[in-house]
Image (cartoon, rainbow, N blue to C red):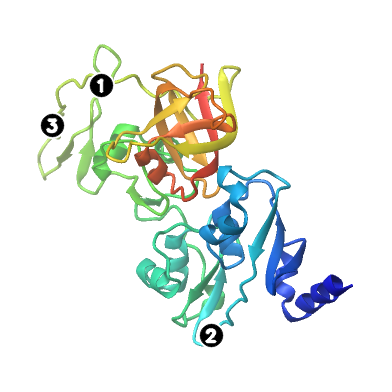
Amino acid sequence: MINELIFVGVSFFHPIVLQDSVGTETVNGKIFVIHQVGEKETLYGISRRYGTTVETILQYNPTADGGLEIGQILKVPYVPKRPVRPEGTLHTVAAKETMFSISQAYHVTIDEIKQWNNLTDNSLSIGQEIMIKKPATSMGNAQTPSPTKNNGLHLVAAKETMFSITRQHGITMEQLKAWNKLEGNEISIGQELIVAAPKNEVVRPTTNASGMTSVPVIAEIKKDQTPVQTTQPKVEPREQPIRISESVKNSDEIMQTGLAELISGTEGNRKYLALHRTAPVGTILKVKNEMNNREVFVRVMGKLPETALTDKLVIKISKSAYDRLGAIDSRFRVEVTYYK
């Protein structure tokens, strides 16, 4: 009966607690929110939802350090939500929104948003509340900027790759890299890319006898001058090309979902490497962080050992790949794609 009265009291004075939980519990005068883990949830996401930290959740749920399971019950210390201050606007993060798109919508900078909300990086989660302290003009008409601009620029959106952008604009990978001075295939959400040849310039990609396309060279056209076709020396591939492509869907594709973990001792290695249970050494895998949809390509450097500590893992990745995915938890859910 006492527990029921406490439950009703918390429901009355803190109704927001019950919107994201299955109930509350009071232990030694301390209120805990009883949370049932849902699909794709992480410790970081749960901590942000209830206004606490991952360390605090682990303090009262030590078994959660090994990863979360759907249906698992967690006791989260209740933290009363702070009232919204009148001098700002509270923005709730929607699907596919980024720190960049929010800053553009409210005409503020990313650094200002991070400062107002005590954030250390650009990672956001769906449903997260962001304080915007500057009153924006014409807020009712504020919109997220269009991914493609009319001035020959493309704003990288979630799940986009260099391959999909080149297909969208009818250009080649070599052109995209040359115009933007890119060396690798990595791009980030919110990055601006040049997707059209600059004015008064001509791009002439050439193909050699082996079928390889050389990097295009941009030559300026002057009046009364015939453009000169210029090519760079033949470029030999340094490693096997990545076979994963968004346009390829056949029986050879293998897709896995599960937990990923950091390979210890790779903090000083800048390469994107992985340990996998079945993929042969040298295979290229596409790994997507299911929490923020960030992707990275990694190369298999060895076999994932069969131990009790790794039985719930699908992959281990190097520190550079871990950082590229914007991972925060020691274990987090990923989607792994590769081809036989």
Pointers 2 and 1 in contact (C-beta within 8 Å): no
Residue type at mark 2 is Arg
Pinpoint residue 74: horizontal percent, then vertical percent: 68, 55
Relative to 24, say whether 234 is above or below: above
Query: Is 21 situated above or below 258?
Result: below
Residue depicted at x 45% and y 53%: 147
Q: How many residues crowd around disc 2 within 10 Å: few (fewer than 14), some, or many (20 or more)?
A: few
Residue 206 is left or right of residue 22, and the answer is left
Q: First in sequence, mark 2 or 3: give its number.
A: 2
Count neighbours of disc 3 (C-alpha within 10 A) and say few if under 14, some if 14 to 19, many if 20 or more: few
Q: Mark 3 points at which residue?
A: 228
Q: Label 1: few (<14), some or many (≥20) within 10 Å?
A: few
Q: Quadrant of the N terminus?
A: bottom right
Circle 1: element type = loop
Q: Which residue is drawn at 37% across and 44% down?
A: 187
At mark 2, the secondary structure is: loop
In this rendering, the label closer to the viewer, 1 or 3: 1
Residue at the front extreme, as displayed: 28
Q: Where is residue 80 in the image (x, y as percent from the top left)?
A: 62, 76
Q: Is residue 94 visible?
A: no
Indicate which disc, 1 or 3, sits on the residue closer to the N terminus.
Answer: 3
Answer left or right for 151 relative to 3: left
Disc number at residue 5? Answer: none
Q: Quadrant of residue 282?
A: top left
Location of residue 224 with respect to 100 vertically, above or below:
above
Residue 151 appears at what percent x and percent y? Answer: 35, 55
Of the two numbered discs 2 and 3 in the rendering, the one whose residue sits closer to the viewer = 2
Q: Which label sits in the foreground, 2 or 1? A: 2
**Nearest the eye: 87 or 222:** 87
Which residue is labeled 2 in the image?
A: 85
Instruction: Please name the residue that numbered disc 1 is placed on.
Output: 238
